[in-house]
Amino acid sequence: MGEGVSTRQRHCVFCAIVAGRVPASIVYRDRATLAFMDVNPVRPGHVLVIPTAHRAQIWDLAEAESAAVYRPLPGLALALKAAMAADAVTIFSLNGKAAGQTVFHLHVHLVPVHAGDPLLRRRGRRVTFRLVQGRASRARLDALAGRIRACLFQPLTLAAHRDKFASGLRRSRRRGARGA
Ligand code: AMP
Ligand code: ZN
């Protein structure tokens, strides 16, 4: 895409957020990416990560752009998990209308998940992934964004959390090895 502003970009709600023309509760921003709260979250703490440049789908990204979009994801996911006291984080991206994409500016969904309330359920070979969007006030979204930002910029908290997670994994591997 050239440097000019295309009609698509002019009508793109995520480009409008990048430009500050539409309000958003910002979690993280660097030169190439922006993370903000989803306005209709499927779980409290639902975050979207986008490239700041208008790219409709993942295959429209140049290699350096895709690296820039993915670089902040581990830190964001960990901060989200800590801020929401979640057990897990589900990460997905819908690319193309047939996949269910509704905003045609690439975005990665990060959704904190608690053990008793999974997004994905398995019954034998039947796997269902059910998303129900809720509503959240701007004040609530701003508060959640602040909570996630606080975890994002506390490397010690993150390191401790990562260690806790790793020791949990080690314990479950040991149990697995013992056949428990
Ligand atoms: P998808 O169906 O993957 O294209 O998801 C689009 C997502 O963008 C949905 O989860 C919407 O709730 C979210 N969304 C749409 N407009 C806004 C907005 N102005 N601010 C934040 N999230 C938005
Ligand atoms: Zn856009």
Image: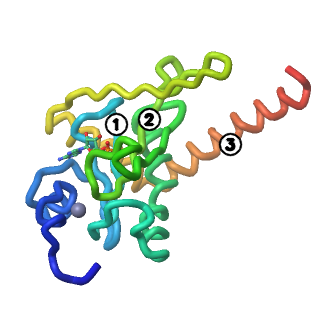
Q: Residues within 10 Å of mark 3 (few under 14, many from 20)?
A: few
**Any mark on residue 89, and which?**
none
**Residue 140: image location, x then y, percent:** 20, 34
Q: Residue at x 47, y 55 (%)?
A: 73
* Residue furthest bottom in the image: 3
Foreground of the two, 126 or 39: 126
Check disc 3 and report the residue beneath it. Answer: 166
Q: Residues within 10 Å of mark 1 (few under 14, many from 20)?
A: many
Marked residue nearer the N-terminal end (3 or 1) = 1
Q: Amino acid at mark 2?
A: Pro
Check disc 1 and report the residue beneath it. Answer: 45
Q: Badges 1 and 2: C-beta atoms under 8 Å apart?
A: yes
* Residue furthest front in the image: 98
**Residue 81: image location, x then y, percent:** 47, 39
* Residue furthest right in the image: 178
Which part of the image, by quadrant, shows the N terminus?
bottom left
**Mark 2 or 3: the one toward you:** 2
Q: Amino acid at mark 3?
A: Ala
Work out how far the residue at label 3 is from the one at label 1, CA to CA, in angstroms: 23 Å
Check disc 2 and report the residue beneath it. Answer: 112
Ligand 1 under 8 Å from disc 1 Cβ: no
Foreground of the two, 103 or 146: 103
Whether residue 26 is situated above or below residue 165 in the rendered picture: below
